[in-house]
Amino acid sequence: MADKPPVLRHPEKAHRADQAQPKKPGWIRVKAPTSEGYKKTRDIMRENRLSTVCEEAGCPNVGECWSQGHATMMIMGEICTRGCTFCNVATGRPDRLDVFEPGRVAHAVQKLGLKHVVITSVDRDDLDDGGADHFAQTIRAIRHRAPGSTIEVLTPDFLKSKPGALETVVEARPDVFNHNLETVPALYPSVRPGARYFHSLRLLQKVKELDPGMFTKSGIMVGLGEDRQSVLQVMDDMRAADIDFMTIGQYLQPTPKHHRVDRFVTPEEFKGYEKAAFGKGFLMVSATPLTRSSYHAGDDFARLRDARLARLGRA
């Protein structure tokens, strides 16, 4: 695991003017985590010296998920080489990779008895392969220690990696390959400046070309300043890339230095997005204010698999 994040967690945002943080509506608020299940999951993570995106990104669902023994493990340290304006993960220069981390992740998966595990990471533009081999080693370690678990990866975009990085991850055969587009293309310069919308889209399309049977998944946040038509266009782009599963959730501003919340999208609007996405042919859609990439991922994976079987049965 990397050393503790730098004292200045977001040095690239220090010069930014503070953005007002509007009061959250009632449908966004969640209770503080206190359950015994939450404490057990937390203790297992601490014992195995593992990072989770649940904590690093300040996910509002951490209490619910950890109480059920679900956690999204974040490999390759706690420090990201990029500085997206929406993200609360620390930015800076990461440490060297921990070669024992894949084994510790697998041990935690086994100890938690996870039926479905989500593995994500920081961006590691400092590595030639963007950390692809480390993802592959982690997948193989979990297959060895917890062969009954299904595996979902939520990867970086490998934008600056050497050729073959994506192939390395796909060849390790995760059950679900997830990479988030995060927002609509017009907002990339202000929200995700280190990334490229069509590169991310092409990454997901290529996964299906490499392994047509692998489930692909992607998600966006709303409330950043997009309009409904641009969200519908992202849905069309995703379907053109043969993406199976789309998630849509409300953006929540981590600190005053982060991108402002343009507005809180209502639960009724989320239902409209869900209906539109299913109408465009996605096998699975999760669209609620508190939806996050790995929220209810295990249950959603079971529904995703059932939806494919049902569609094949109708073919």
Image: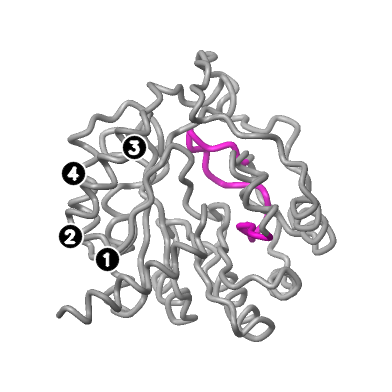
In which image quadrant can residue 191 be found? top left
Find out whether the residues at labels 2 and 1 contact each other: C-beta distance under 8 Å: yes
Answer few, some or many: residues within 10 Å of disc 4's Cα (few below 14, many 20 plus, some between 14 and 19).
Answer: few
Q: Amino acid at mark 1?
A: Gln
Give the number of the mark in front: 2 or 1.
2
Q: What span is in magenta?
A: 69-89
On the image, numbered disc 1 is attached to which residue?
A: 205
Rendering coords of residue 290 (x, y %): 48, 40
Secondary structure mostly seen in magenta is: loop
Of labels 2 and 3, earlier in sequence is 3
Of labels 2 and 1, earlier in sequence is 1
Find out whether the residues at labels 3 and 4 contact each other: C-beta distance under 8 Å: no
Of labels 2 and 4, earlier in sequence is 4
Quick check: can you spot residue 11? yes
Rendering coords of residue 159 (x, y %): 40, 56
Q: Which mark is residue 295?
A: none
Find out whether the residues at labels 2 and 4 contact each other: C-beta distance under 8 Å: no
Rendering coords of residue 260 (x, y %): 45, 22
Q: Is residue 116 above or below residue 16?
A: below
Give the number of the mark in front: 2 or 3.
2
Of labels 3 and 1, earlier in sequence is 3
C-alpha span from label 2 to label 4: 11 Å
On the image, numbered disc 4 is attached to which residue?
A: 233
